[in-house]
Image (spheres, rainbow, N blue to C red):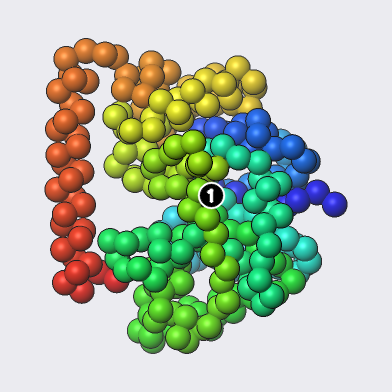
Amino acid sequence: MKLPVFVGSGDASRIERGVLEYSLLRHSTQPYDLHVYNGSEGSVENGADSVWKPEVLAALRGRRFATEFSLFRYVIPELCNFHGRALYLDSDMICLGDIAELASLPLPDGAWFASVPGAYPEIGPERWALSVMVIDCARCRFDLQSIFAGIERGEYTYTEFSQMAPRFLARHPVPIAPLSPSWNSFDTYNSETRLIHYTDLDRQPWKFKYHPAGGLWHRYLMEALQHGTLTEDLLRRAIDNRSVRPDIKLGPNGPNGWRERLGAPLHDMRLQFRDAVRWLAYRSGWAR
């Protein structure tokens, strides 16, 4: 049986999703079944000609949270008939390792899934990154109706739920296994990195210049175009829809002119100010 791999996506993320799909194909040593959830349409795509709309997804359409596919990961066990293992990935990633290795990592007895712990130190040390999940579908059960009711009662926030924060786990003691940060590295990579996640929305290299790992993403974009995972037509439509920047093919920083040389430090200063404001908001309790 092939490993089921689920990717959360939408109409606006077609290009970064294609880059991820190419990276999975490039590094995987075993066959897998790729299922892409299009949150814009409420459908799951399995190959170019296979689109299905499971009934369980209908209830997610009316609930809009961080992204249009945020809730999809919690229904994956049901989509797998509560059998075997599955992987979940966000679309804004490049996989640099073999997902067969990821899927075969041991899960301690009782763990519903594995994810990276301590992923949001600016918020607090006990938060998990559920953007990569190795799921034991036979064990994992998210009662979304009960969880939403807790959010509405003010017992915890949606962010605390999505990051498995202590206030959420006090009400819903989900057993989680730790996953190496090398399998969900936020915006940086080195020789040990197995998967890089482009999390900074003000730096994602398909929309902005000057990302420190933008060159890596651009290289995989060009290889995906050469391979056929992405096409020039798809890229042109994404540019027309403003899903990617118009000079995307010119490299991670676009043309190497005076605007680019001046823009890089100014962009960094703006983001440093943004990060300082966020840090103060979390420390003062304005945000959870």
Residue at 55% over, 59% down: 179
Frontmost residue, 145 versus 278: 278
Q: Position of residue 238 (x, y in %)?
A: 46, 29
Q: Quadrant of the C terminus?
A: bottom left
Q: Position of residue 99 (x, y in %)?
A: 66, 45
The secondary structure type at the circle numbered 1 is helix
**In the displayed structure, would residue 62 be above or below residue 263?**
below
Residue at 64% over, 37% down: 24
**In the displayed structure, would residue 111 be above or below residue 246?**
below
Q: Is residue 42 visible?
A: no
**In the displayed structure, would residue 65 be above or below residue 93?**
below
Q: Is residue 188 visible?
A: yes
Q: Is residue 213 left or right of residue 223?
A: left
Q: Is residue 150 left or right of residue 76?
A: left
Residue at 68% over, 48% down: 101
Q: How many numbered marks, from 0 up?
A: 1
Residue at 78% over, 41% down: 31
Q: Position of residue 212 (x, y in %)?
A: 33, 33
- Type of the residue with mark 1: Trp
**Label 1 neighbourhood size at 10 Å, few (<14), some (14-19), many (20+)?**
many
Q: Position of residue 264 (x, y in %)?
A: 20, 28
Frontmost residue, 118 versus 225: 118
Frontmost residue, 264 versus 286: 264
Image quadrant in which you'd find residue 256: top left
Residue extending furthest toward the front: 191
Q: Is residue 267 left or right of residue 22?
A: left
Instruction: Tell me the residue that label 1 is attached to.
Output: 183
